Image (cartoon, rainbow, N blue to C red):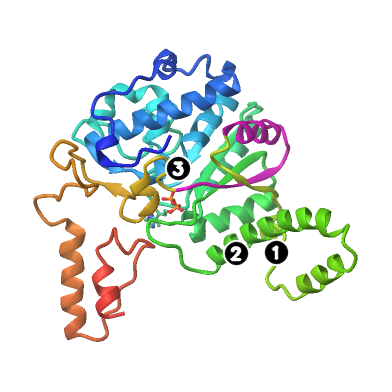
């Protein structure tokens, strides 16, 4: 179900019988049937909407990985098997599932839960993050260490299409392509970073998707046009003029990875069956999934940049609009952004460089006024 308006956000804890029945060590999750997993994902999404609406924090990324979170904890024996989330801003559903549900109301407050994975918080948080692009490297270290000690452990890195553009991620991709540890990287491609993606890799991922869609269409039309004399030849000639077709994943295959995808990351049954197969494959495995940032909350789906992170929503006060309540004081990044603009106006040697997050670092104004 898509929640569409702020009034629809749960202000009281939604009914989540299946989620309530799970033990904090996730015993039993592995035994759930496919239709139960789908129901669990729905309950988890509602619980997430309820808790983030109450505390504020990272919003869109977590909503986009609800199915993936359920699938990973269902297929893998966590925390013995290790999930390494890149950046970690997408781990709110993971935290709800892994024993911290009753503390979600303390998110990002003093003595409360961290907005990122934190090893001291839970054995399910395998790596302390916040900085991006580290997950593949960390997961590779864990995989090699387990191999060396003869421990039978699966290791999975989950990385976004924004974070994977970081140099460290590529260092690890190249390294693992050479060392060939048994590990899985899941590329969560939602066509978004914090802001809109830029750069050649984003174009490459878009081409992969376009080629897959095109191939599916081609297979369909082959069946139909094959029966019409001349029509198929004409279609083939047209096809020769099409530029920019790419075989999915060639780049990763060339680096030494076995690539599967792109798959619909919200199709839970398909995700589960693919993960089950991939879990037993040897060597470095790469699964490319496509998801929607903000999935299940229509305003966030429409505006993934604005809803990357939100302030606490106050549904009673803001009953008529989906606009997050304004904070009282300007944010640190806004003060910084204003200072940067003032400086750049009087000194043309000043250039702004964002950490791939123009909005979050208060640099929208300088981009617009002094591009
Ligand atoms: C070293 C470093 N640089 C920049 C950032 C800012 N940052 C936070 S999340 C992120 C990428 C988000 O995009 P993606 O990985 O696609 O995840 P999504 O939010 O789309 O799920 C970036 C660049 C960071 N956390 N660490």
Residue 176, given in percent of the width and then of the height, sits at: 64, 49
Secondary structure beneath disc 3?
helix
- Kindly identify the residue that appears in the image at 26 percent across and 34 percent down: 107
Mark closer to the chain start, 1 or 3: 3
Residue 9, given in percent of the width and then of the height, sits at: 28, 35
Q: Is residue 346 above or below residue 157?
A: below
In this image, 164 relative to 325: left or right? right
| Residue neighbourhood size for the residue with mark 3, other residues' Cα within 10 Å, grouped as few (<14), some (14–19), many (≥20) | many
Separation (CA) of disc 1 from disc 3: 26 Å
Give the quarter of the figure containing the N terminus: top left
In this image, 159 relative to 251: left or right? left
Mark closer to the chain start, 2 or 1: 2
Is 110 or 178 nearer to us in this picture? 110
Q: Is residue 59 above or below residue 215?
A: above
Secondary structure beneath disc 1?
loop
Separation (CA) of disc 2 from disc 3: 21 Å
Circle 2 is placed at which residue position?
Answer: 204
> What is the residue that sits farthest to the front in this orientation?
228
Q: Which mark is residue 64?
A: 3
Circle 1 is placed at which residue position?
Answer: 246
Q: Is residue 342 above or below residue 283?
A: below
| Residue neighbourhood size for the residue with mark 1, other residues' Cα within 10 Å, grouped as few (<14), some (14–19), many (≥20) | some
Residue 276 sits inside the magenta stretch: yes
Give the quarter of the figure containing the C terminus: bottom left
Contact flag, marks 2 and 1 (Cβ < 8 Å): yes
Residue bounds of the magenta highlight = 268-292
- Kindly identify the residue that appears in the image at 27 percent across and 80 percent down: 370
Q: Is mark 3 within 8 Å of ligand 1?
A: yes
Residue 180, given in percent of the width and then of the height, sits at: 70, 46
In this image, 215 relative to 271: left or right? right
Count of labels shown?
Answer: 3
């Amino acid at each position: 179900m898509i929640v569409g308006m702020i009034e629809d956000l749960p202000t009281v804890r939604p009914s989540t019988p299946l989620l309530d029945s799970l033990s904090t060590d996730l015993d039993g999750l592995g035994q759930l049937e496919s239709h139960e997993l789908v129901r669990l994902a729905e309950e988890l999404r509602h619980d997430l909407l309820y808790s983030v609406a109450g505390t504020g924090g990272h919003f869109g990324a977590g909503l986009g990985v609800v199915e993936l979170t359920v699938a990973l904890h269902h297929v893998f024996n966590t925390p013995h098997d290790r999930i390494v989330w890149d950046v970690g801003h997408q781990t709110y559903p993971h935290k709800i599932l892994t024993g911290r549900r009753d503390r979600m109301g303390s998110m990002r407050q003093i003595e409360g839960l961290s907005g990122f994975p934190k090893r001291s918080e839970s054995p399910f948080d395998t790596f302390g993050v916040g900085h991006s692009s580290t997950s593949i490297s960390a997961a590779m270290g864990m995989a090699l260490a387990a191999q060396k000690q003869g421990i039978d452990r699966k290791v999975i890195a989950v990385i976004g299409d924004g974070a994977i553009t970081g140099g460290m991620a590529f260092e690890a991709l190249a390294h693992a392509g050479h060392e060939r540890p048994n590990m899985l990287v899941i590329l969560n491609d939602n066509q978004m970073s914090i802001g809109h993606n830029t750069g050649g890799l984003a174009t490459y991922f878009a081409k992969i998707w376009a080629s897959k869609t095109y191939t599916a269409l081609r297979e369909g039309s082959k069946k139909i046009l094959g029966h019409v004399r001349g029509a198929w030849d004409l279609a083939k000639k047209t096809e020769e003029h099409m530029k920019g077709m790419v075989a999915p994943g060639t780049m990763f295959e060339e680096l030494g990875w076995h690539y599967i995808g792109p798959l619909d990351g919200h199709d839970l049954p398909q995700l589960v069956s693919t993960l089950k197969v991939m879990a037993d494959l040897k060597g470095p495995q790469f699964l490319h999934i496509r998801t929607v940032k903000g999935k299940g909350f229509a305003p966030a789906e429409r505006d993934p940049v604005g809803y990357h992170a939100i302030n606490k929503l106050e549904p009673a006060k803001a009953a008529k609009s989906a606009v997050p309540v304004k904070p009282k004081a300007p944010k640190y990044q806004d003060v910084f952004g204003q200072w940067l603009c003032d400086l750049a106006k009087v000194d043309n040697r000043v250039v702004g460089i964002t950490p791939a997050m123009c909005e979050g670092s208060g640099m929208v104004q300088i981009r617009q006024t002094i591009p």
